Image (cartoon, rainbow, N blue to C red):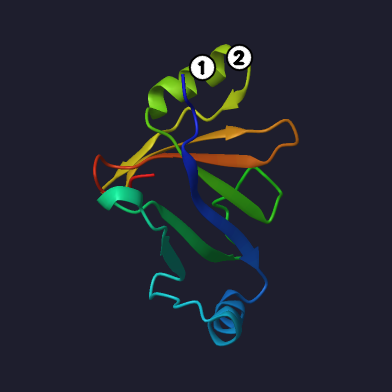
Amino acid sequence: MARVSGIGGIFFKARDAEALRAWYQAHLGLEIQDWGGVTFRSPAPDGEQAAVTVWTIFPSTSSYFAPSAAPFMINYRVTDLAAVLGELRREGCTVDDRIEESEFGRFGWVHDPEGNKVELWEPPVGRFPG
């Protein structure tokens, strides 16, 4: 079974998230949106819809990456979140019981052997392919 189809997002913490966003905007030309990040769309071959990767900075006080102590989290796209989480559980991985669903898709989490929280994202069909 294919598990990961691409990088869905890169998230990291900053002591001063607003100032760091401004630096990235001024010096690297990132067009930071009101929600605090950027959505990159990769070119798609043969008229297919582009893949999406989200980049954003969280405040250092954010608990979104908890229980991981790492100041970053990678989001990976998957095509069948339930199947991937089930396989990871059967393999003895530490998988969060919670699954979040929204208009952006379905989200689940696994922790790697060093305790880093890894987000798995099943985009809604046809909305954020990749």
Residue 48 visible in rendering:
no
Residue 105 lies, with reference to residue 20, above or below; the image says above
Q: Residue at x 51, y 62 (%)?
A: 55
- At mark 2, the secondary structure is loop
Residue 99 lies, with reference to residue 56, above or below; the image says above
Residue 121 lies, with reference to residue 37, above or below; the image says above
- At mark 1, the secondary structure is helix
Residue 58 lies, with reference to residue 79, above or below; the image says below
Q: Nearer the viewer, residue 39 or 99?
A: 39
Look at mark 2 in the image and give the residue it sits on. 91
Task: Please state if 48 lies on the left or on the right of 64 as rendered.
Answer: left
Q: Amino acid at mark 2?
A: Glu
Circle number at residue 130: none
Look at mark 1 in the image and give the residue it sits on. 87
Q: Nearer the viewer, residue 112 or 130?
A: 130
Q: Amino acid at mark 1?
A: Glu
Task: Please state if 48 lies on the left or on the right of 30 as rendered.
Answer: left
Q: Position of residue 116 (x, y in %)?
A: 67, 41
Q: Residue at x 58, y 48 (%)?
A: 74
Quarter of the image for the C terminus: give it.
Answer: top left
Q: Quadrant of residue 26?
A: bottom right
Callouts 1 and 2 close, C-beta under 8 Å? yes
Q: Residues within 10 Å of mark 2 (few under 14, many from 20)?
A: few
Seen as rendered, the residue at the extreme bottom is 26
Seen as rendered, the residue at the extreme right is 114
